[in-house]
Amino acid sequence: MSLVSVIGAGSLANVFANVLHDFLPEFKLHSVLARNQEKAQVFASKYNCSAVFSFEDFLKNAAPVVVELAGGAALKEYTLPILKSGRTLICLSSGAFTDDAFKQEAICTAAKNNGRICIVNGAIGGLDFLQTCALQRGASEVVIETTKSPKSLLGAPALEGKTLDLTKKMVVFEGGVQEAIKGFPKNINVGVITALASENPHTKVKIVSDPEVHSNTHKIIYRSALADAVMEFSGKPDPANPKSSTTAALSAAACLKNLYSPISFW
Ligand SMILES: NC(=O)C1=CN([C@@H]2O[C@H](COP(=O)(O)OP(=O)(O)OC[C@H]3O[C@@H](n4cnc5c(N)ncnc54)[C@H](O)[C@@H]3O)[C@@H](O)[C@H]2O)C=CC1
Ligand SMILES: O=C([O-])CC(=O)C(=O)O
């Protein structure tokens, strides 16, 4: 049985733990690092793992694979020490890697210490295709259009002081990935990973608020001399947190499964 530790005891961490418990009995949750003590105790007793509240204590005893399901700030704070300890870090809040200096330091730290960073597909798919095409570079266009209901977008820093029309479809953002993740840190990690996997820093992001939708939809348009693709992913918002699609947590579980499996799908 392989052990895994998680950072965060929120919506996606619970989905992840459930999937492990119900469908991947070859894995056992070892520990959870959390901020909210009450949530963490409930999580720890439900999934029979230990709850830890200090990162230093967590790192001393963490499993060889750590899964981040906590947010960009947490990922930035914990990535380097986790990699220095030679562990594998599976991460969801990959928007943190728009900071190029941080990304390069993480890669160097992983390389030096036999650590590993796995950026998962999260709420989308197709990172394999984008990375495959990036081997010959030169994408002429990469666009991601994300559509969510207003309640999935509310609370985003970019919307502060603005009125979001709760009755009409509207474009709430158009621009680059850097600006997008700053303005919508809990909504557009998928935009960052699209840009990273396609190695296209000019990836364009459009975010649409649509009161009529009941899914989080991400449409990726990729064009290059080598191949064109249109990929659209529509996932149900997690009932506990409508900002996040439930499949994002499943994607971390699938990544974990691939890490240990004699057969993997790339
Ligand atoms: N790549 C992707 O496709 C997606 C990525 N995400 C990322 O996953 C994150 C988690 O999503 P949810 O579970 O829905 O959010 P959530 O808000 O339900 O849960 C996050 C949990 O992490 C905890 N947390 C925050 N900072 C922490 C820290 N420094 N140490 C320990 N715990 C900490 C919070 O207390 C909270 O319980 C999102 O913030 C987002 O960055 C979410 C959806 C899709
Ligand atoms: O869950 C989703 O649909 C996408 C998301 O929040 C993100 O990429 O941050």
Image (spheres, helix red, strand yellow):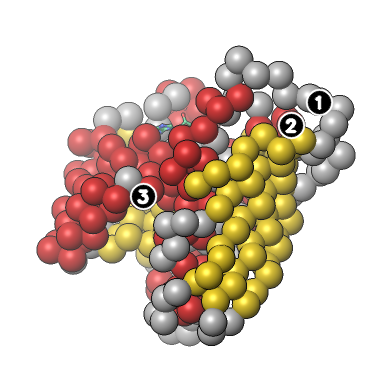
**Which residue is painted at 77% across and 47% down in the image?**
215
Q: Is residue 5 visible to the viewer in this orientation of the structure?
A: no
Tell me the amino acid under the disc marked 1.
Leu
Q: Are marks 1 and 2 in contact (CB under 8 Å)?
A: yes
The residue identified by callout 2 is: 150
Asked whether residue 150 is in view, the answer is: yes
Q: Which residue is mark 3?
A: 97
Residue at 52% in and 33% down: 183
The secondary element bearing badge 3 is classed as: helix
The residue that appears at 73% across and 24% down in the rendered structure is 164
Q: Name the residue beneath numbered marker 1.
A: 166
Q: Amino acid at mark 2?
A: Pro
Residue 213 vs 140, above or below: the answer is above
| Mark 3 to mark 1 CA distance (whole Å) | 32 Å
Viewer-closest of 106 and 255: 106
Classify mark 1: residues with Cα within 10 Å, few (<14), some (14-19) or many (20+): some
Crowd class of label 3 (few under 14; some 14 to 19; many from 20; radius 10 Å):
many
Quick one: SS at disc 2? helix
